[in-house]
Image (cartoon, rainbow, N blue to C red):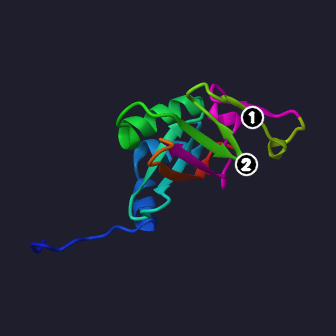
Amino acid sequence: MREGYYHYLSPESALRHFRSCDKVKEVLSGELDGFILHIKDNYFPQYWLYIAVPSSLTLEDLDKFLRDIWVECCGHLSEFEIGGESVSPDGEADEITDNSFGDDEGVITAKDKLSDILHKGLEFGYTYDFGISTELTLRVVDGAK
């Protein structure tokens, strides 16, 4: 590689490569119950990643994962926005009611399994720190349901 040369791998190219990984193939084939998520920064779209997560994880688990690999600096609050409503893994407002999940009394908490919340094509938000926020968009690319 030439000095100073920057190679940009597009999200589409990365997804093709990601789908060739053994664990991801297990998710895609249904052998492993999980989801493939595309995560990107809302203001700096050149920052993104794909992850495969078991459907048995919760929003609390997903929050911890995002903190560990991307956003954590000082123990700030965070929240997910799903269907226009907020779910806080920090316990501040840890449940919402939302009619877009199939019933009139659908209550989502940060302790619910991803299998009860996510479905292919769902796009939802994540905010870390409510001062100088990191705002991410997560999209379910493939997997369970």
Q: Which residue is more in the foreground, 40 or 13?
A: 40
As for residue 61 lying within the magenta part, the answer is: no
Disc 2 is placed on an element classified as loop
The residue nearer to you, when weighing 68 against 135, is: 135
Q: Between residues 145 and 93, which one lies in front from this camera angle? A: 93
Tell me which residue sits at (38%, 44%) in the image. 70
Work out which residue is located at the far front of the displayed protein and give it. Answer: 131
**Labels 2 and 1: the sequence-earlier one:** 2
**Residue that badge 2 annotates:** 83
Local crowd size for mark 1, using a 10 Å CA cut-off: few (<14), some (14–19), many (≥20): many
**What is the x, y in percent for residue 116?**
71, 34
84 w.r.t. 98: above or below: below
**Residue at left 39%, top 64%?**
46
The type of residue carrying mark 2 is Gly
- Picture mark count: 2
Q: Residue at x 72, y 49 (%)?
A: 84
The answer to whether residue 41 of the structure is visible from this angle is yes
Q: Quadrant of the N terminus?
A: bottom left
Q: Quadrant of residue 91?
A: top right
How much space separates mark 2 and mark 1, taking CA atoms?
A: 10 Å
Give coordinates of residue 10: x percent, y percent: 40, 68
Name the one closer to the observer, 90 or 137.
Answer: 90
**Do the numbered discs 2 and 1 sit on residues whose CB atoms are within 8 Å?**
yes
For the record, the magenta segment spans: 105-128
Q: Is residue 124 magenta?
A: yes
Point out the image quarter for the C terminus. Answer: top right
Relative placement, left or right, of 140 versus 135 is right
Position above or below: 13 against 72: below
According to the picture, the residue beneath numbered tag 1 turns out to be: 96
